[in-house]
Amino acid sequence: MNPEKVVFGFFIVMALTLNFGFFLGDIDNPDHHHVYELAAAIFVNLFATILKFGDRSQIGAVLLSASFVADLQLFAAAIVWGVAVHIEKIGLTPEVMSSIVSLAGGAMLANIISVLLLVLETAMLHR
């Protein structure tokens, strides 16, 4: 067993599960989506992105691209949250929360693609 691959797989799957945890719940209800869940999803996604830099294969390039998409979506969600709460002072209205959760949903889709590619790559290695 390759410890490097275990760590790599762990962070890719952890990024997806944290993102899913934030995404789950009523899309417009701030009580169902905590800022620390979003922060954890951002942190783990960034770490997973860093781990993907070493892979020079074609699948590695697609994994890195999907990771960049997830990072950008999560950053956008955090910016919307920060602007609504701290700059515009409108708070977490249903419209704002829907935008935040929708952006996190886009990141989750990118994370699903990463996990599927990882499983596909692993299945191809055993043949």
Image: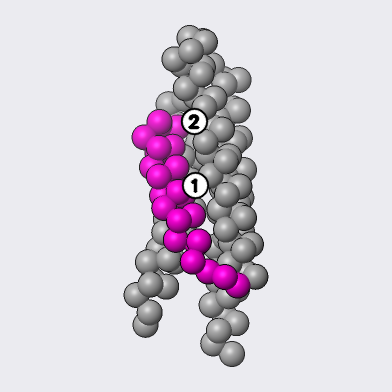
Q: Nearer the viewer, residue 6 or 91?
A: 6
Q: Disc 1 marks which residue?
A: 20
Q: Position of residue 110 (x, y in %)?
A: 60, 52
The mark found on residue 84 in the picture is: none
Q: Position of residue 46 (x, y in %)?
A: 45, 48
Q: Disc 2 marks which residue?
A: 78
Residue 100 versus residue 121 in the image, above or below: above
Q: Is residue 25 visible?
A: yes
Q: Does label 2 or label 1 sit earlier along the sequence? A: 1
Q: How is the image coloured?
A: one colour
Mark 2 in CB contact with mark 1 (< 8 angstroms): no
Q: Position of residue 100 (x, y in %)?
A: 55, 30
Q: Residue furthest bottom?
A: 127
Q: Position of residue 103 (x, y in %)?
A: 59, 36
Q: Is residue 92 visible?
A: no
C-alpha span from label 2 to label 1: 16 Å
> At 46% from the left edge and 16% from the top edge, which residue is drawn?
85
Q: Is residue 102 left or right of residue 40?
A: right
Pointer 1 local density, CA inside 10 Å: few below 14, some 14–19, many at least 20: many
Quadrant (top left/top right/bottom left/bottom right) for the C terminus: bottom right
Frontmost of labels 2 and 1 is 2
Residue 69 versus residue 122 in the image, above or below: above
Q: Nearer the viewer, residue 88 or 20?
A: 88
Label 2: which secondary element: helix
Which range is magenta?
A: 33-57
Residue 73 versus residue 18 in the image, above or below: above
Q: Is residue 12 left or right of residue 4?
A: right
Tell me how many marks there are.
2
Pointer 2 local density, CA inside 10 Å: few below 14, some 14–19, many at least 20: some
Magenta stretch: dominant SS?
A: helix
Which residue type carries mark 2?
Answer: Ala
Which residue type carries mark 1?
Answer: Phe
